[in-house]
Image (tube, rainbow, N blue to C red):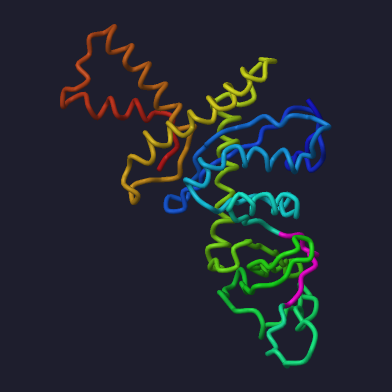
Amino acid sequence: MGWYWSGCANQAKWGLEIGGLAAIDIDNHTAFHLEAVQTLNTDEQTLTDWYAGVISDRKDTLTGISKYLVADAWFSKRPFTDQIISLEMHLISRLRDDADLKYLCKDPHTGKKGRPRKYDGKIIIKDINKEYFTLISQDEESTVYAAVVYSKALKRNIKLVHVTYSKAEVKDACKLYFSTDVSMDATDVLLYYQSRYQIEFLYRDGKQHTGLNDSQARSENKLHFQFNASLTSLNIAKAIHWLSLPKEERGAFSMSDIKTMNHNTLLLKRFIDVFGIRPYSIKNQNYVKELILYGTMAA
C-alpha cells in the first residue's frame, strides 16, 4: 500500500498500483495485455528506477515485439530515458508544455580554433522557427511540425513533433511529442503515441467486466494472478470474437456485448437441453442467432 498518483482524480491517492505492459497493434488499432506488475512501495529505490527495472527484467520479451517503448508524459525524465536507451530501446513520450529545447546549429565550420557552436538559440514553443521545422501536415484540427532538437532535461537530441491543436473557444494548444530515435518518421511518432490510448481501454474493460478491482486477496502472488487473469481474459475475448472477423466486418470492440452473448448462449443451451429443441434445424437457426444477440448493442 502507498500513495500513488491517480490520473482520474488528478491527485495522489492511498491504495495499490499496478504497472501495465501491453502491446499496441497498430494495424488493428487496439492493444493486448502483456503483464501487470504490482508497484512495490520501498525506500530502497525511486519509482522511476522501479518502473525502469520492470522494463529491464523483461527486456528480451519486449524487444522481441518492438524496440519502441511508448509511455505517458510522466516518464519523460532523464533517469528513466537513460535506462531505456541502455536496454537498446527507444522511448516515445510527451514533454512538458514548457520544455526547455534548443535549435541545433547548422552553420558550416569556420575553420577557426575552438569547438564549433552546437546550439542556435532556445525554442519558443508557441513561436517556432518554421524555416528550421518541417511541416508534416495541416488541417482544420491541427498543424504538425517536426525537427531534431536538443532537450535540456533529457540531455540528448530528440525527434520532436510539435502539434498545434486548433480550438474555436480557447487559444491554440501546443503539445510536444518526441522519440529518442532521431531517424524516426514524425508521423510514426505521433501515431504510436496516440495509439497508446488503446491501453486505457484494457483497464476500463477490466474494471467494468472482468473483475480487475474485485479481488479481496492480500498475498502479492494471489493479487498478481488476479490482475493478469482479469486482463488476459480480455485478450482471449478480443482474439475469439473480434480479430477472427474480417477487418471490414468489425465494429467497435465491446466486452459488454461479448459477455451478453456468452450469457445468452449458456442460457439457451440450458433451454435446448431441457426442452429437447433442435437448434441446428434450418427453421430454428435464425431464432437461435437472434436469442444469442439479444441485449447486445445495435450495430
Q: Residue furthest left?
A: 282
Residue depicted at 71% across the width and 65% down the height: 156
Quadrant position of the C terminus in the picture: top left
Residue 105: quarter of image: bottom right
Choose top left, top right, bottom left or bottom right for residue 18: top right
The quarter of the image holding the N terminus is top right
Q: Residue 152, relative to residue 68: is it above or below? A: below
Q: Is residue 99 magenta?
A: yes
Q: Is residue 206 above or below residue 248?
A: above
Q: Percent position (x, y) of residue 279?
A: 22, 20
Residue 234 coordinates in the image, percent (x, y): 49, 32
Disc tally is: 0
Q: Is residue 166 left or right of residue 59?
A: right
Residue at position x 19%, y 22% in the image? 280
Q: Nearer the viewer, residue 159 or 96?
A: 159
Q: Which residues are magenta?
A: 95-103
Residue 85 in the image, given as x and y percentages of width and height: 64, 54
Q: Residue furthest top?
A: 274
Question: What residue is shown at x 62% (from left), y 19% (from top)?
Answer: 221
Q: Position of residue 294 (x, y in %)?
A: 39, 28
- Image position of 176 (left or right of 208): right
Residue at the spot x=43%, y=36% of the render?
A: 238
Of residues 108 and 289, the one drawn nearer to the viewer in this rendering:
108
The foreground one among 271 and 138 is 138
Q: Quadrant of residue 106?
A: bottom right
Q: Would you say residue 127 sits in the magenta stretch?
A: no
Direction front: furthest residue: 113
